[in-house]
Amino acid sequence: MAELTPSQTVGPFFHLGLTWPRVPATVGSVTLSGQVLDGGGAAVPDALLELWQADAAGGPQPRGGLQRMAVDADGRFSFSIVKPGAAGSAAPHLVLAVFARGLLRQVHTRIYFPEDSALHASDSVLQRVPAARRATLLAQRDGAGLRFDIHLQGPQETVFFDV
Amino acid sequence: MTSYRPVPAGTHPLNHSPAYRSTALRAPQLPAIRLPAFALEYAGPQVGAAQLQPGGADLTAGGKAQGQRILIHGRISDEQNRPVAHSLVEIWQANAAGRYRHDGDQHDAPLDPHFSGAGRVLTNANGEYEFLSIEPGAYPWGNHANAWRPKHVHFSLFGPAWASRLVTQMYFEGDPLLPLDPIFMSVPDAAARQRLVAPFDLSRTQAGFALAWRFDIVLRGPEDTPFESAPHG
């Protein structure tokens, strides 16, 4: 058994090495936007987000479906996504990792869709989350798109997963 | 079904590490919730050629960058010692003077037009990678009085699944700043911390051209694969 290499923070200068092209909007895609906030409610201007998702049938995409984006100076981001399908009892969701200066290891969360409340009742991951905190994992409708804010800390702290 | 064993305690830093001041308002305070083994996070993705850039193995513009030329190389494997093959490796670092090619870096040290500061390669079939770079300088930062980051190179790795994703930093054997650095020291287990320190590698130096450092990396991987269940004598 080989011993794991530890994590270290991505630091403030990751744009130099980790910038990828933006994934453009396509037919059927929706805009998922939001903001990353710290425990004082201030925007986090130097976070890096990675988003991955299943395909339209709910299956993993071994070599696709991955997006990466640095937030802007106000901590804001905007992805174009195509909603994934449900897989078995798992409700459609996106997986999201947040990297930043001040995070020594990335944090993992998930984004669920507001119209799927019936499926959420049977989703085995959501059922592990205390009911009072599940709302932090739900995107909100925002015009024609979706909004999902990430609270790293504070009274609205987003649910993070031990992956 | 494959499964990932939990990460041994002490391997990764706790996000709440007060000596590193930027963690104060950013580290989540509530416990993370464990995912079931069939979660999407254990099913991929594998990230390779789609994100590759031409020329990404040489950060020195053909050796013209200022500073000590170094080969940075190593092998990436998973916990079962299987190579992480054809997988994306991204690095970025300060130049020889301790300055990043980044608008946010205000350190009063010179930029080097011949040093790109970032590289991107794929591992080969054996999980091996190499970059030609220069030895980065240490640089001051505002964490505490007279704080200096030890020389380091940032690394970004993928591996077989979302769960194996790793961003880390490579340090250099013998750097006197290491025990003074709250980011390096944030790794609780001393043996784990030492795995971030690359040894000097005489065997891979290039006579008359470059020194060499070896940084091997171990990522999380599934515990079972049907391919390994064949009986052996």
Image: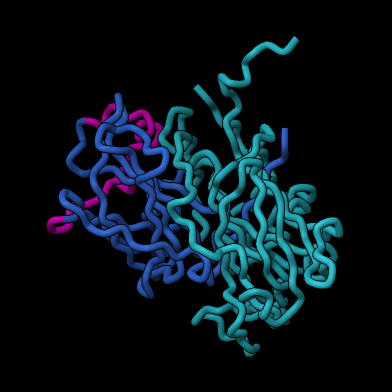
The answer to which of A129 and A82 lies nearer the viewer is: A82
Determine whether, in the image, residue A71 is placed left or right of residue B225: left
Q: Position of residue B79 (x, y in %)?
A: 66, 36
Q: Is residue B54 among the parts visible in the rendering?
A: yes
Residue B199 in which image quadrant: bottom right
Quarter placement of the N terminus of chain A: top right
Q: Position of residue B1 (x, y in %)?
A: 49, 21
Q: How is the image coloured?
A: by chain
Residue B178 lies, with reference to residue A67, above or below; the image says below
Residue B22, magenta (yes or no):
no
* Apparent colour of chain A: blue
Question: What residue span does the magenta drawing correspond to?
Answer: A119-144
Q: Which chain is cyan?
A: B
The answer to which of B213 and A87 lies nearer the viewer is: B213
Residue A59 lies, with reference to residue A12, above or below; the image says above
Q: Is residue B145 among the parts visible in the rendering?
A: no
**Residue sitting at x 78%, y 66%:** B178
